[in-house]
Amino acid sequence: MKFFKSIIPLILAILVTIGWDRSWGTIPPFGKLLSPYHGFWINAEMAGSEEMSEEELKIPGLLKPVKIVYDEMAIPHIFAENDHDLFLAQGYVTAKDRLWQMEFQTHFAGGRIAEIVGEKGLASDQFQRRMGSLYGAEQSFEGMKEDPQAKVALEAYSDGINAYISSLSERELPLEYKLLDYKPEPWTPIKSALFLKNMSFVLASGTDDLKMTNILRQYGREVAEDLFPNYPFEESPIIPAGSPVDFKSVPIPAAPKDFMGLGSAMKTPEKDPNIGSNNWAVSGNKTVSGMPILANDPHLTLSLPSIWYQVQLVAPGVNVYGSTMPGTPNVITGFNKNIAWGVTNVGSDVLDWYQVKFKDASKLEYWHDGQWKKTKLRIETFKIKGKKDFVDTVFFTHHGPVVYLSHEKAFRSNIPVGHALRWIAHEKSQELTTFYRLNRAKNYTDYTEALRYFSAPAQNFVFASNEGDIALWVNGKFPLKSKLQGKYLMDGTDAAADWQGFIPQAHNPHVKNPVRGFVSSANQFSTDPSYPYYLGWQYAPSERGRRINERLSAMSKVTVDSLRGLQNDNMNIRARKLLPLLLRSVKSSDKALGILKSWNLHNSPESMGATIFETWVLNLQAFLWDDEFASNEKVPMNRPSIDRTIHMIEHEPQARWWDNVKTKGQKETMDQIISTSFKATLDTLVKQHGNLGAEWAWYKHKQTGVRHLIPGMDALSRLNIPIGGGGSIVNAATTKTGPSWRFIVELSKTGNPKAFGVYPGGQSGNPGSVHYDDLIDTWAKGELRPLLYLDNANQSSSRIRKTITLSK
Amino acid sequence: MQSNTIRIIILIIVGAIVGLYLPWYAMGIQAGILAFLLRFPSKSAFTTGFISGFLLWGGSAWWLNYSNPSALPLRMATLLPLQGQVSLLYLITALIGGILLGFWAWAGARLR
């Protein structure tokens, strides 16, 4: 009894220790996390002082010493004596600021989130792997290794990351590891390939084939083609109509037989469609300085830590500055002394689905081209935190993986079950070589040479050089298709429906020094319909592109600052066209109508007109189309585009679609649908924000936020940012997406380029650092920071705050 | 009373050193070992340990934030969620330290 009594406190002590040493579901390990000697308290980083600091670090594997200087924004400028050391140092400094993000994003890409968060991550992981993310990364890694320079870059970058990881003690781990209670694993070069492949997931995995087939089955081909036309009514393509063609096109394959397909799927959540980008370059004869100016703002999901990390990389043969993606070597968009380049996404159709006919339940054979062919099996093993491993078998036809078998439930509503996936992201590729060469490019020839290696996700590469050239290539690997091939789900048994090779890279749409004096892209159609090849039937809505082209045509005496103004342009040209058409149908004495009528058509942060108009457009689309196109959630369809709706208001006021088929015995007119949707808009807004007033301000309604990568981590996010714009606005800030990196470069014949840039985040991934989110306010105000471009390691600058010397 | 103050000072100093070099729970275990070796009276051992841990954890956290101010405590006080009350975050940190050292000191004293 005495013994028992004396042992009780010990048991309590041990229980408390064990209980606080581990996480319980989402509850973090309190002891470890709150200990002032181990937990989050020591992750706080003091604001940098104005005084210079110097540091020396030993890094195994370096060939020669490397000098790194940090400027006041904590941007590293790396000076190395060879490529190997340059990339090793890039890996090291990037990991120092962004280790958790790099690992988390590649875990996500590789379908390994369940290892961190447990079983709730499994469905997403399985989806990633069934889509072939790991398979694609393996393929692409093989391709990258074939270029010896890319191989050096990948391996040295990886060594640099690992040098940082092995220098960390447990108490020095980034905050998120402490919150989620796990440790970093060693980096491997294939993770860089995974990261790049994930960009295809982000940018080139959009697919409406299933929804289009559902529409085809319900309404027939004529209606489907009428409501979902293959070129917009209003467009201003990237390559101006009439641009010279410098190639003779190869024969286009014959179209496969018409195929109806089974279509259908279960309703599940979908991706944010508002990802797009702007870029342009203005030729010297339109600028004050007489030199070309280039601007770029890629729109991605806004996140903390930011997807971008700025760096300057200097070694023999290279001095490049720009934004990098943590997880991959080289600068992705930026400039050097001679050239500047930027990217926007190409919305071409590089992902198709083939309905598979298996021989029997074993799924070991499938019917294609008149014979039974063997499927290939790939085993995917998933580790799950706190559970036994889950083993999954993926069946591959020659097209690619059967992402979901016909009895399974898809992770997203636009993914068809029982279909094989043919996707450009599964091809062997060499994107790193493109960036390596662009970083070192001196002129237009070097730029075009670099682009030859790029497969996916296809990008509009804008270019300007200090020789005075401006250019834009719509660049990537594009399947050679018959017209509209892959708009709908295809017949997996029909060999004529297969991809029949690729468009020769030299035939990709491109333009150099056009007469109009500028090149631009904003994800709209690459070309006008005279381009000989079929690239896709649906691109991003044309408003941003049209507005940019309209402004650039009108502008003269262009400066960096006037282009900064264009990046922040809030003009709503959709409203300019649509609002007068809508107002014709509305009779109301509501004050809100007065606000709309006197609205200056700018989506500025405080605008109430923008809130009313944008909400109205959403309601109008729903009122007009949802009775026919969203009536059965098991058969997901797309609504026709706004462009199509506007055309219908202008030219087809009697169209059958205006009638709401759910009201029996009544026939609604266009005017009725428009005015009811207006009334519903006001009701919604009053319900959300109270009576018409300051709460209706556009930025308060829109709620742009830069959110931490872990969903729901509001405490580590910046929400409700006062910024205008919107999805169809040049300043493309939406609730969750927006200009993820804005930069403008003015080239110089003799001196250094003048460059300015900002991204909504900060260099440090540590929520305990001032550099975690210190650039967001500058970004929201539409300002840019001057970028420090140093010539050599010994150049002095009042902006340098810290120097680190790395040696072996 | 005098000797209790000394005990508390010992636990805090050894606890800080152990905290710098060993895992977090070693700060508790050291209290247990010291309570055993130095024959802490078992009636007051928990209180002695608790006060030591409370001061050690709360004081160290306060010192860290004082000498190295950042937005992190506010962010953590929002995340945990404590409605952004940093003072509550200090209190919870101190309480966890207190309970840890309290139980271990009690356990050590009782085992003798």
Image (cartoon, helix red, strand yellow):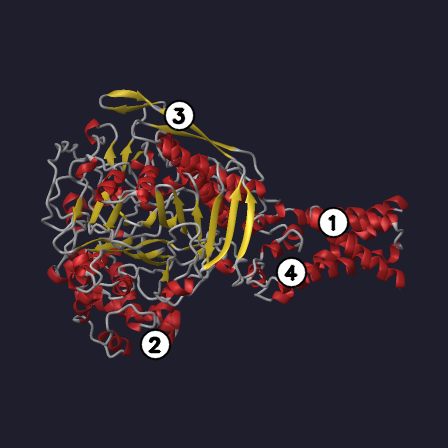
Q: CA distance from mark 1 to mark 2?
A: 61 Å
Discs 2, 4 touching: Cβ within 8 Å: no
Q: Amino acid at mark 2?
A: Leu
- Res. A68 in view: yes
Q: Amino acid at mark 3?
A: Leu
- Image position of A322 (left or right of B4): left
Q: Secondary structure at mark 2?
A: loop
Determine which residue is flagged by label 3.
A377
**Of label 3 and label 2, which has the lower sequence position?**
3
Q: CA distance from mark 4 to mark 1?
A: 17 Å
- The crowding category of the residue bearing disc 3, from other C-alpha atoms within 10 Å (few below 14, some 14 to 19, many at least 20), is some
* Image position, residue A795 (x, y; %): 42, 54
Q: CA distance from mark 2 to mark 4?
A: 48 Å
Instruction: Please identify, in this view, whether the residue under mark 3 or under mark 1 is nearer the observer.
Output: 1
- Image position of A8 (left or right of A622): right
* Image position, residue A23 (x, y; %): 61, 48
Tell me which chain the residue with mark 3 is part of: A
Q: Which mark is residue A692?
A: 2
Quadrant where the image shows the N terminus of chain A: top right
**Of label 4 and label 1, which has the lower sequence position?**
1
- Res. A104 in view: no
Determine which residue is flagged by label 4.
B64
The answer to whether residue A365 is above or below residue A792 is above
Q: Nearer the viewer, residue A299 or A16?
A: A299
